[in-house]
Structures are given as structure tokens and as C-alpha cells.
Amino acid sequence: MKTNVSEKIVISKLLVLVLIFVWFFSDNSFAQCDWKRVTRISNKILQTRHPTNYYSFNDRKALESIEFISMMDGWTVGGDNIVLKTTDGGNTWKTKKIKFIKQAGTSRVYEVFFLNSKRGWIVGGRGSKALILATKDGGKKWKQIGDFGDKVDSVLTTIVFINEKIGWALGQKDTTKEFKKGIADDHKMGAIWHTSDGGNSWQLQHLDEDALFSLEVLDDGVLLVSGVDYVIKSENAGKTWDKIFKTKSVSLISKIDFVDKNEGWAITGYENVFHTRDSGETWDDIYIVDKTHNLTSSGFATVHFRNRLEGWVAGANEVIFSTQDGGKTWSLEHFRKGGGVLRDFAQTKDKLFVVGGNGTILSRGIVNCQ
């Protein structure tokens, strides 16, 4: 059967269209896997004229925490009482005004945590005064809660709940009076608080000699908390604590992240990443360096693993490294000299977000990116 000229032309055109279709979607797929900066933020307070020094962890414009309750709906909070919300999957963010934050005189909100699509909490504070807000309707309405009695006043930096009643929070106790009297080594001490009524009342479980930064609830009442250069562990839901790991040098362990009850990661403000496979009893030290760009980590602040193999670490200079083989090898994904400190990751079904200094929000796709 012979093919005439007109049929050949039609076939050629169809082939060209198919090639264009394949090229467009394959190219677009790879583009979605690159880190992009969110620019449409309806809050001028985030637009700083002078970039914050890359090593500053006291950036007043920094976004400290990010959380998604669905593919479309997410929250991020930070310094200067910043609370932002997205309803379009992180493409645009709008200011959420919560009157209780202003009334409490809070200077900083440190973390937003949602147990599910309805129940959530925001924590922060100023000086030695803690702030806790709670919502039962996905953030439409917030209520100020939290009775700490007259034991210790703390600025709260971290909060985690395992159900609607039971949760823990990390705080920084103001010990200025004790410091002046010579009975405290610093102006701040770490405090671990526990609640069994959804955050309405809190009991002090542990007071540590140094500031505490990150909290992970593993399984069956097993908790891990990171400090300046060590990790402490409780196997009875916080009633008692033991120091299980200490770094060789003083390096702030700002974040720990577990993919299951056994395997987890911890990062420091230097170039080290620590890996455990036994619930934190032993840790392997991994040093990350990018020889191609002559770049070390510049100091990490946060870590996130999607599964046992695929993970990211991020920190100063907006540096982001990734691994696809469980931490054996690492690749540089993003870097901006003079950029702020990236502080927290959040993941949806198809995207990964990270927030940090100067109101920075970065995102990338995580589907079909191998």
C-alpha cells in the first residue's frame, strides 16, 4: 500500500506535534523540580531593603515555621508577629490578623502546628511571657489558651500534639534574676512542658541547663529533644530524661527529624549531619561539602526526610543540599550568598516548601523528579 504526499504531510505534522508535546511536558516537569521563590506575598513588612546578615538567627523578619493542612491550605509564622496563610497551594500568601497576638504584646511567633485539618496551635512569646493560640476550625477562629500557674514563665518555641488532648511544648525560661544572683549560668534555660487537656493547662516536666530547640515524639511515650550540643531522651512520656548523645564540639543541634520510630536525623549550626538507626542511642557523623562549587554547608538549621532515602538539609546563605540514597551522597540544590537562614520545611503531596530569613519562602515539586 502506497502512501501519497498528503498523507506523508499529515503524518509529519502529527510527529512534530507529538515531539513538541513530549518536550514541553518533560521540560516543564524538570522545571517544577527546581527551587522557586514565592514573590506574591501581600505583606510589605516582609520586603526588607537591606538583606539580613547570613549568619543571623535573630532576623526579625524571619519566618520560623511552616505547616500545611492540605494540598491547598497552609500556614507560616515568624518574627514581628507574622502570620501568613495560603489557600492556593503556596502560590500566594496573605496576612492573617489574629487579635490575641497583638493584645498579648508578643514580639515573635515561633511555631504553627496542626494535628489535623481542624485542630491547630500557634506558640510564641515575649520576654518571659508565653503565648499559645488554639483553633478547632482550621484557623478561622483562634483562642488564647494556656495556664502555666506561677511556677515558671517561658517563651514557647515548639509545640507537638499526638492527639487532641496530649501534647508537649519547649520553652525558654527567663533566669535573669537568678543570673544576677550568680545561681544561673545564662539568662535562658530550656523548659519542657506537658499538657493533657489540649493546652489549657501545662505542667513543667523538665528544666534543662541550656536552651532546647527541637522535639520529636517517636512511639510509646518515647520523646527526643535537642539542646545546644546534645540530645536528651525520655521513655516514659517526659517524666524523666537522660542525655543520650553529645557532639564533640559545641554546635547547636537546631533540628531533629525522624522518618519512623528508629531512623532519624539531626543537624547542627556547622557542617555536620547526624544519623541514627536506633532511636537516638547511637549517631553517625556526616560532613557535607560540595567540592564542585567549593562550598561547605555554611551552617544548617533544618532537615526534612520524605522517606528513608530522600531528604534535604538547609541553612545559612539559603543553602539546600539533598540526598537520594539515605545520606551517603549529597548534592547542592540551591544557594544564595548573603541570603538568610532557612529554618523549616513542610511537604504536601506534590510540593516541598522551606521558609526562613527576610520572609523567604521557597518551593519545588517532588513528583517525578528522579
Image (spheres, rainbow, N blue to C red):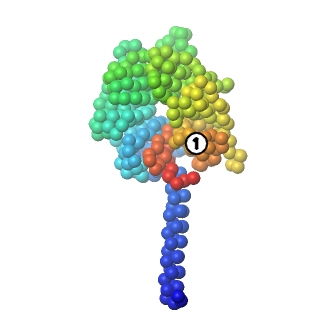
- In screen coordinates, is 85 left or right of 248? left
Query: Residue 84: in sight, yes or no?
Result: no
Which residue type does callout 1 highlight?
Answer: Leu
Residue 143: quadrant of the picture: top left
Q: Point out residue 239 in the picture as x, y percentages from the top left corner.
A: 46, 15
The structure residue drawn at horizontal position 53% and vertical position 10%, both measured from the top left corner, is 183
Q: Point out residue 250 in the picture as x, y percentages from the top left corner.
A: 64, 25
Q: Point out residue 91 in the picture as x, y percentages from the top left corner.
A: 42, 52
Which residue is more in the foreground, 9 or 91? Answer: 9
The structure residue drawn at horizontal position 34% and vertical position 29%, both measured from the top left corner, is 164
Judged from this view, the residue extending furthest toward the front is: 1
Q: Point out residue 84 in the picture as x, y percentages from the top left corner.
A: 39, 42
Count the numbered circles shown.
1
The structure residue drawn at horizontal position 40% and vertical position 47%, both measured from the top left corner, is 71
Q: Few, some or many C-alpha atoms within 10 Å of disc 1 (few <14, some 14-19, many ≥20)?
A: few
Where 291 sits versus 236, above or below? below
Quickly name the residue at label 1. Answer: 309
Query: Residue 353: in sight, yes or no?
Result: yes
Label 1 element class: loop
Residue 248: quadrant of the picture: top right
